[in-house]
Image (spheres, helix red, strand yellow):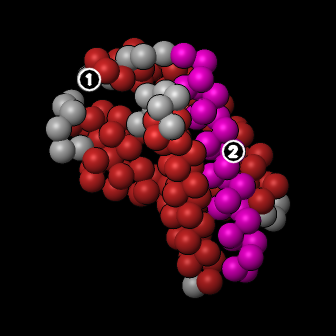
Amino acid sequence: MKIILSLLTGGIAGTAVMTGFLLLPRWMDWGKIDVVRAVGSLMTGRRERIFRLGLSLHVAMGILFAFLYAGFLNLSRIPFNAMTGLLLGSLHGVIVMLLVSIMVMEHHPVAGYHEKGLGTGLAQLVAHMLYGATVGWIVSIIQ
């Protein structure tokens, strides 16, 4: 039960850190990354009333990936901590960076999300690294 609580908490906290990092450039008027609305509009094909859906899906995926990270590390008999979380987040981030840059941006149903740039991909990579490190840190503290 303790591991489930730690993974739920870690997944939510990791997603909050990742989302905050991804929204920071938009809040500071440095860029247009809005991952929550992009996820929501990816599902609906429109821009209106998508924040709640996008946020729900983003948090659900954050929790799911916390469990996937833990499952992989458990099978590998490697402890889950900030460092192993960072490493998994790096791998996850590279995959997401490529998927977002190649597939999502080119094929997103809302044209406003077709913008490309190195900054978007790098932000995705760093955000996933922060996610993994946060989840691993919280799991290691609670266990």
* Marker count (numbered): 2
Q: Which residue lies furthest to the bottom in this view?
A: 1
8 vs 20: above or below = below
Does dot 1 land on a helix, a strand or a loop? loop
- Coordinates of residue 98 in the picture (x, y in percent): 57, 23
Q: Name the residue under label 1.
A: 110
Residue type at mark 2: give it. Met
Can you say which quadrant of the picture contains the N terminus? bottom right
Q: Is residue 67 magenta?
A: no
- Coordinates of residue 74 in the picture (x, y in percent): 73, 63
User: Which SS type dominates the magenta stretch?
Assistant: helix
Can you say which quadrant of the picture contains the C terminus? bottom right
**Magenta span covers which residues?**
117-143
Asked if residue 7 can be seen in this view, the reply is yes
- Coordinates of residue 24 in the picture (x, y in percent): 53, 42
Q: Does the magenta stretch include residue 129?
A: yes
Q: Nearer the viewer, residue 130 or 30?
A: 30
- Coordinates of residue 119 in the picture (x, y in percent): 59, 23
Residue name at image x 69 percent, y 45 percent: 129
Q: Which of 139 and 17 is in front in this view?
A: 17
The picture quadrant where one finds residue 42 is: top left
12 vs 86: above or below = below
Residue type at mark 1: give it. Val
Residue name at image x 31 percent, y 21 percent: 112
Left or right: where 44 falls relative to 22: left
How crowded is the residue under tag 2: few (<14 C-alpha within 10 Å), some, or many (20+)? many
How crowded is the residue under tag 1: few (<14 C-alpha within 10 Å), some, or many (20+)? some
Left or right: where 50 falls relative to 113: left
Q: Name the residue under label 2.
A: 129
